[in-house]
Image (cartoon, rainbow, N blue to C red):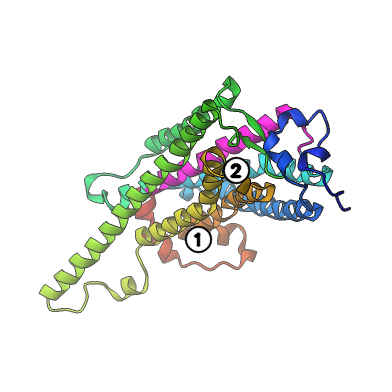
Amino acid sequence: MATPKGYSLMDLVPDDVKPLIHPHWSNFPPVNPMWHYLLAGIFIILGILSFFGNGMVMYLFSCKKNLRSPANMFVVNLAFSDFMMMVTQFPMYVVNCFEGGYWTLGAFACQVHAFTGAIFGLTSLLTLAAIGYDRYCVIVKAFDGGHISSSKAFIMILFCWGYATAVSIWPFFGWNAYIPEGILTSCSFDYISRDWGTRSFGIFLFVMCYCIPLLIIIFVYSQIVSAIRAHERALREQAKKMNVQTLRSNSDQNKQSAEVRIAKVAVGNVFLWLLTWTPYAAVVLTGLFGDQNKLTPLVSALPGLICKTASVYNPIMFAISHPRFRLALMEVWPWFCIHEDKDDDTKSTKTEDGETK
């Protein structure tokens, strides 16, 4: 059904919902209804994939004792936060898309939607940083007793949740607010208002949720890459002194060590995270300090949807691609047609537990 000419996005919103919405969105015409159906369909697919992917990781962790290592505690925490992200986000988003293309669930549901999205999204990001730190301890600090114990991993996980909660709770106390955004089918914090309170909270979030975790991730993975290069260089120099081509056995030449393999997977995941979250960070900074005319409803909505894709690829990158998780998949669900050599499981034991079994 076509929208009459001259209508704005706000004209289609019921009067009881209008107080929740920033006047900025009245400057734009309604989006084509097909966008709502398309985005709802995409969100349904993402929700189903996230539900089964992350649910699978949590189930395997609960039923396979050999997966209950300190390193995998971070992986299952990532799966849980991603799982909860989609459980709390996609049902409300889809309902609003099909109910009329605006927020229909009231102010309280809007706050819950935004708050849970902030907590689970930030916890996932911090857990990625924790996974990077764990890899750093295993690969860079291996000879300094740097392996993380289960108790230390548990404390780090609690810190991730506490950090995310402490950052996300402020709009309930008057510093900023959770309001509908973009095409008005989802809620987030206010990044449109130009008062000092809104801007200061936006800067606070940008530093705490983007810059600090990113700096940690860059540091640990740059150290990992440097350590791997130094190790390879030392092997080449030693082989040259011994007048041999290589010090590696044939099996070692055919397979990378589990540490290097997992580090590469983690680096790839962080790169994907940058691709998914940087557009949203750019939208926020534009809303607070840039040309707001560029923030059309779709321009504001699409980066938020892209962010949700992380909950789909995280279990694939960090769990399903790992030898020990793949072996567990083979045992529990052989019809997945996954093949993994048990040698990889043996080689990865040192990485997971800090000792050879």
* Residue for badge 1: 321
- Asked where in the image residue 111 lies, by quadrant, the reply is top right
x and y percent of residue 96 in the render? 78, 42
- Residue that appears at 76% across and 50% down: 31
Furthest residue in direction right, as rendered: 1
Relative side of 234 to 199, left or right? left
Residue type indicated by callout 1: Ser
Indicate yes or no whether the magenta region holds residue 192.
Answer: no
Comparing marks 1 and 2, which lies closer to the viewer?
Answer: 2
x and y percent of residue 76 in the render? 52, 45
| Mark found first going from the N terminus, 1 or 2 | 2
Relative side of 67 to 103, left or right? left
- Residue that appears at 44% across and 36% down: 208
* Residue for badge 2: 292
Residue type indicated by callout 2: Gln
Give SS at disc 1.
Answer: loop
x and y percent of residue 178 in the render? 63, 31
x and y percent of residue 259 in the render? 35, 58
Residue range corresponding to the magenta coloring: 103-132
Q: Main secondary structure of the magenta part?
A: helix
Give SS at disc 2.
Answer: helix
Of residues 221 and 247, the one nearer the viewer is 221
How many marks do you count on the picture? 2
Instruction: Say if residue 14 shows up in the picture.
Output: yes
